Amino acid sequence: MAYDPRGVRFVLTAPDTESTEQGFSPWKQMVYASVPAQFAPRFLYKKMLAQQTYPDGTAVVMPYGLRIAEAILLEEYPREDVAVCHPDQLDLFVGPRTRAVGVSAHNPIGTAFSTGVYSNIFGSSARPINAYESERIFFHPAIRKYRPKVIVGGAGAWQIEKTGSMERLGVDCVVIGRGERVILELFERADAGEELPPVVHAPEPALEDLRVPLRRSTFGIVEMTRGCGRQCAFCSPTLETRISIPPEQLLEAVRANVREGGRIIFAVSEDIFIYGASAPFYIPNADALVNFYEKVASVPGVDYVPLSHATLAPAVVNPHLIKELSKILLPKSVLRNPRSTYPGNRILSPLIGIETGSPRLAAMTMSGKALPFDIRDWQEIVVEGTNILNENHWFPVYTFIVGLPNETDDDIKQSLELLKRLRKNKVIYVPSIFTPLEDTRMASGRALKPRELTRLQWEFILTAWKQSRELGVVNESSNWLWKAGMFAFYYLRGRWVHGPQFRYPAMRFAGIPEHRLRGHLYLDLSDTTPPPPARPPRLVAKHRSSTLEELARLQDGQPFSVYGTTRVEGASPFRVVGQA
């Protein structure tokens, strides 16, 4: 792109925390939503966010959503009218000719799920690093000087509307939802000098509206599916139409990423197991999944292929599918853990929403996560599914939500009991405090402040962190520093910020012997009695026949087993498990 001192008509940008490929690990981006900016001066992490640029100053790597916006604009405008750049290069492209700046926003205010615990544990007003990095864009001198229209989209754009921050940040328009059907019109209106609507709730795009951009995206992201179908009350993507992007388009995007120097391909989905699935959607299409990942992994230049979000029930439905995916993906994993017995200690770590150990609360908020099994057997599904994943060197990242509407002490106790059942398993836990998200059935719910958490809720959060630390922090001196850090935090700040209910959970994390905590906490982790094995989960009665028929249809000739009693003839190497 030829440099124009008057600026470029349209400029697209994102915080550096959203475009970094640090360590080739997508999960490391979570750190920037967790650490408060006030305790992390920028000079401490600036080098880790160093970004590649082309000679003209445009970005080599940018978030997938911005690449979609770029592709849409380039269908109507010449290349010299659209620049995609990092914040530090904004002054090269924003000038008197610039009509609009599009900003990708994942967590611009700091009210995402993860921030609820991981930043606000330091205090209810703590602002995470990625919110600070977003403000570096909004308050950039070039944008403030030339006053182009500022259009914000992305997963966290709703935060700006909900907190009434548009005027403070200088934002002209916030796009809520998928933007394919509104992006071009908004930029055209900005180009014509028209006023923009403050908030646009974008209609759901149809299949023909979808774009698969052919430019390098952060972590080589390609979107393999949209929507979900499991109808969780706290989630918005589940309300979208379920779409699987054709593999030919995805592979074209994969090759485009590699051509521009990408080494990692991150095929993202709300649930990888719905890819290519037909009715019933909760039965994985094993052939489609295995074929897709085989083709991605075989593209020359693709060194790493991490796993995206998933649900756990499909692992119980089809354990052999997990084994087949492991053969393909473990050699392409960048993640390692000494407790893995796979060569090189490689592991796979999909992000899986468990959310609660309480079948009652699960039935109220996310019964679809258990399908085709009965949500009353939620703990059995989790335990059995975790065993299957661990057997195949998958060390999953499990999210839990504390403070869901209608949560009771008994619900939290059941979540704690699930932690104890999984104590010997290889799991990283990411507990968060419930945050009501826009366009969900729980949008009107109330988010707890950390100070309002009960002792039981703090016990769950800090017990989960303790078990994660025991798996993830393998260096003994580092482990000691984590424990000492909790002691220091508790006595210097934590007890004043979170009150007396924080004390004993914090002491457990800090390594105080369990016998000294007995009577103060619900779980007694000094009890070494092995937990009971998982019981076979029951199939939901109304799904039983369709499930077995679909499983039989998917087979090629060899028998598979349905937990315990029923055998259905067919021919697939994939063994399907469930109770008849």
Image (cartoon, rainbow, N blue to C red):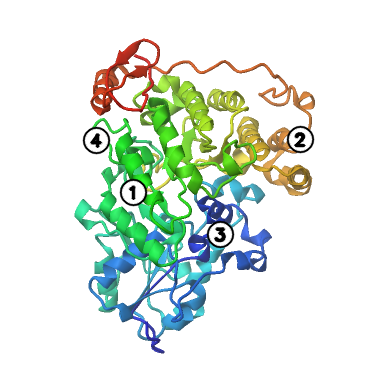
Instruction: Identify which amino acid the numbered label 3 is placed on.
Output: Gln
Tell me where residue 87 appears, x and y as whole percent.
49, 72
> Crowding at label 1, few (<14), some or many (≥20) Cα neighbours within 10 Å?
many
Q: Position of residue 91 (x, y in %)?
A: 47, 81
Mark 2 highlights which residue? 511
Q: Are marks 3 and 4 in contact (CB under 8 Å)?
A: no
In the picture, measured across the screen, residue 506 lies left or right of residue 37, that is: right
Q: Quadrant of residue 41?
A: bottom right
Q: Secondary structure at mark 3?
A: helix
Which amino acid, mark 1? Met
Residue type at numbered disc 2: Gly
**Circle 4 sits on which residue?**
278
Disc 4 residue type (three-letter): Ser
Q: Residues within 10 Å of mark 3 (few under 14, many from 20)?
A: some
Is the residue marked by circle 2 packed among few (<14), some (14-19), or many (20+) residues within 10 Å?
some
Rendered position, 357 above or below 492? above
Q: Nearer the viewer, residue 520 or 268?
A: 268
Q: Which mark is residue 224?
A: 1
Quarter of the picture holding the N terminus: bottom left
Q: Report the Cα–Cα distance between label 1 and label 4.
A: 15 Å
